[in-house]
Image (cartoon, rainbow, N blue to C red):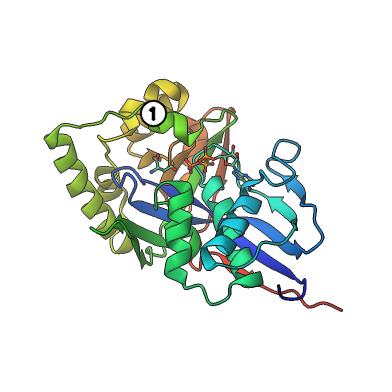
Amino acid sequence: MPASRTVAVRVPATSANLGPGFDSLGLALGLYDEVAAELLPGGPTEVQVEGQGAGELDPGEGHLVVRSLRAVLDRAGVPQPAGVRLRCRNRIPHARGLGSSSAAICAGLLAGRALAAPDLPDDEVFALATEIEGHPDNVAPCLTGGLTIAWTDPSGTPRKLGLSPHGEVRPVVLVPGTRLATAEARGLLPKDVPHTDAAANAGRAALLIAALTRRPESGLLLAATEDRLHQTYRAPAMPGTADLVERLRAAGVPAVVSGAGPTILVFGTSDTHDSIASEVGSDWHIQLLDVDRSGASVHFPETR
Ligand SMILES: Nc1ncnc2c1ncn2[C@@H]1O[C@H](COP(=O)(O)OP(=O)(O)OP(=O)(O)O)[C@@H](O)[C@H]1O
Ligand SMILES: N[C@@H](CCO)C(=O)O
């Protein structure tokens, strides 16, 4: 194993689905978790967490970043260290629909690759992240930045295409205090959907790509963010979210459930914050964010 050194990884929050693009579309947001990681030949694993999840997450081998770091070493056929030291500064809220688990997985994979498996290609990292997360739509923008379209090819390999959203697209997230685990939200989905609903979503998803990259007008965005494949089925698990999305949309605001919820994502403009604030009660934390355009980053801090 190479000499012990520390790597620093920064990973963005992400919003998946974006309305009609279930398990396919995703957007990287300017809100970041930071992880410093080191391999410990003598063990044991130590995890320090500041911010989101502090005092709640497994402080050892069960921590998702540690498990992901070890997974990438296994995938690369590299020997495992006895332990791992992590310092995590978390800003992405957990189980809210902002891609916290994807961020943790990508952080672990990128840290492990940088420390011990530098030849592992990007595609392998993306495939492993998708395998651990279960679907590609958050990991794609987390790794790449910007707006991403993810799909699975006939051999089962995940693929992604990155696009640059128009400069006028301003994501606003409305984050409630309540949580909803993605696994629970996925359990509410039907096995089959009506053909008319699938057809409607396909058209809306295509329109959304055009609106986000070329014509971010609120009328187009409102039409382009209609969904019939997941939001209604999940509404019983997040009634406050479903109600607010409906009210915002009735007022002409392009609002969708972010990821598996319960956060709401609005495609806004620079003055959106004020107009939403009047519609939304104090139970929601409103954040106007930038689009992250570069995705996860990795560096080795200078040591003295
Ligand atoms: N930074 C982190 N470090 C360790 N574990 C984490 C971290 N972030 C998330 N997790 C784990 O992932 C869980 C949340 O994952 P989940 O997929 O339910 O929601 P999400 O990723 O926040 O939302 P979504 O997938 O809808 O965008 C947390 O409860 C925790 O167990
Ligand atoms: N496409 C995923 C995103 C959340 O991880 C879902 O809606 O379940």
Q: Residue at x 68, y 42 (%)?
A: 52
The quarter in which the N terminus is drawn is bottom right
Q: Residue at x 66, y 52 (%)?
A: 66
Q: Residue at x 66, y 43 (%)?
A: 62
Establish if 220 lies above or below 197.
below
The mark total stands at 1
Horizontal side, residue 67 vs residue 75: left or right:
right
Give the residue pinned by disc 1: 187
**Mark 1 Cβ and ligand 2 under 8 Å apart:** no
Horizontal side, residue 259 vs residue 119: left or right:
left
For residue 200, say whether it is visible. Answer: yes
Label 1: state its secondary structure. loop
For residue 144, say whether it is visible. Answer: no
Type of the residue with mark 1: Gly
> Which x, y percent locates residue 112?
62, 64
> Which x, y percent locates residue 35?
69, 58
Q: Residue at x 64, y 66 (%)?
A: 79
Establish if 120 lies above or below 200.
below
Establish if 180 lies above or below 225.
above
In this view, which residue lies farthest toward the right?
Answer: 304
